[in-house]
Amino acid sequence: MVGPRRTDGEVSEAMQARQGWAPDHGITSPLPLGQKLRGTSTLIDKRTGEQVLQWVKSNEDAEEQHAVMQAAIEAMGERLPREKARRAPAVTNADLANVYVLTDYHLGMLAWGEETGADWDLSIAEDMLVNWFAAAMSQSPASETGIFAQLGDFLHWDGMDAVTPTSKHLLDADTRFQKLVRVAIRAIRRVIGMLLDKHSHVHVLMAEGNHDMASSIWLREWLRAIYEDEPRVTVDVSPDPYYCVEHGKTALFFHHGHKKRPAAIDTVFAAKFREVFGRTEHAYAHMGHMHHIDVKETNLMVVEQHRTLAAPDAHASRGGWMSGREACVITYSRRFGEVGRVRVSPKMLEAA
């Protein structure tokens, strides 16, 4: 049953109360920016009925924290050095798009090979990222469009504390967060430069993951600022964790997998991108999150869950959650959908 609408005055009072100001109820301790009221405990003198002490309980206001972070990102983005436009490659195939699918890379994670089966740290991850893109590009066709589809969890943790953002589980971290940010930006800019040397147009997608919910925001916004003077680069800055690229008669959908599992994702994409889905003949959904392969064809589209290049961490290894390691570059035609695929694994990179 829907209750009566609140007036603007009542809404304003509710917002003030949330921030710790409700004098009619004895709450007169405004909270600092980024906090919201969780509750109060008040000690009343039985003889006089007057308030003796009051404990104000608060926690982080997620909406306010997001707004503050967004403002900081925009301000810092104004001071980033812009990439200058560079000359496009001479020969590309206008019918084709190469999609470089990278997911769950966990940059900044620390894994000890004796415990997990393979070493992983910041240096290993940065080198592998660049080497993987070099190998993938050398084996894929000269398509007009290159799509850097980073499907989330690119960073292993999301702030000053090396914990998961939601559950606060302790993570094995290699370095300081500022160094992690520096390496992430450096590596991504290097990869985009490589893609510009191969493709006439580069589309960048930095999807939200469950490990880097906030970091994916500043990655998107900073990259858009950095490449605003390079017309051959577009960056998807959608705040919604479901993404879409229309390539002729081919629809490409992307989601990390932390909000919807593969079995239920096709209807979400069809509903969110109804016009694109209606215009196209071929539809493909790409997801990560679970670190292993799972491919299903539904009545609406092909849904594919991808492996990661990253080594397993101690949590995955001790839990017995094992999978192969690889990433794919998939070639799509405007007319025919998927027409080619290249798989590159860490062992292939080592052998080369």
Image (cartoon, helix red, strand yellow):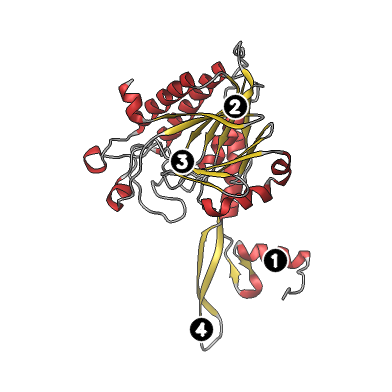
Q: Assess disc 2: are there few (<14), some (14-19) or many (≥20) residues with their C-alpha within 10 Å of its C-alpha.
A: many
Q: Which residue is mark 4?
A: 45
Picture disc at residue 128: none
Q: Are marks 4 and 2 in contact (CB under 8 Å)?
A: no
Residue at 61%, 25% in the rendered image: 96
Q: Earlier in the sequence, mark 1 or mark 3?
A: 1
How far is the residue under mark 4 from the one under mark 3? 63 Å
Q: Nearer the viewer, residue 50 or 213?
A: 213
Give the distance between the C-alpha atoms of the residues marked 1 and 4, in whole angstroms.
Answer: 28 Å
Rendered location of residue 47, percent (x, y): 52, 89
Q: What kind of element bears circle 3?
A: loop
Rendered image quadrant of residue 127: top left
Give residue 5's quadrant in the image.
bottom right
Please tell me how crowded label 4 is: few (under 14), some (14-19), or many (20+) other residues with Cα within 10 Å: few
Q: Nearer the viewer, mark 1 or mark 4?
A: 1
CB within 8 Å, label 4 to label 3: no
Q: Residue at x 50, y 22 (%)?
A: 140
Q: Give the label on residue 13, or none.
A: 1
Q: Nearer the viewer, residue 103 or 123?
A: 103
Q: Amino acid at mark 2?
A: Ala
Picture quadrant where residue 19 is located = bottom right
Label 4, secondary structure: give it: loop
Can you identify the residue that label 2 sits on?
97
Q: Tell me where residue 52 appears, x and y as whole percent.
A: 50, 77
**Residue shown at the point (23%, 43%) measured from the top left:** 115
Q: What amino acid does circle 4 point to?
A: Asp
Looking at the rendered structure, the kind of residue marked 3 is: His
Judge from the rendering whether residue 239 lies leftward or rightward of residue 110; answer left or right.
right
| Residue placed under numbered mark 3 in the picture | 306
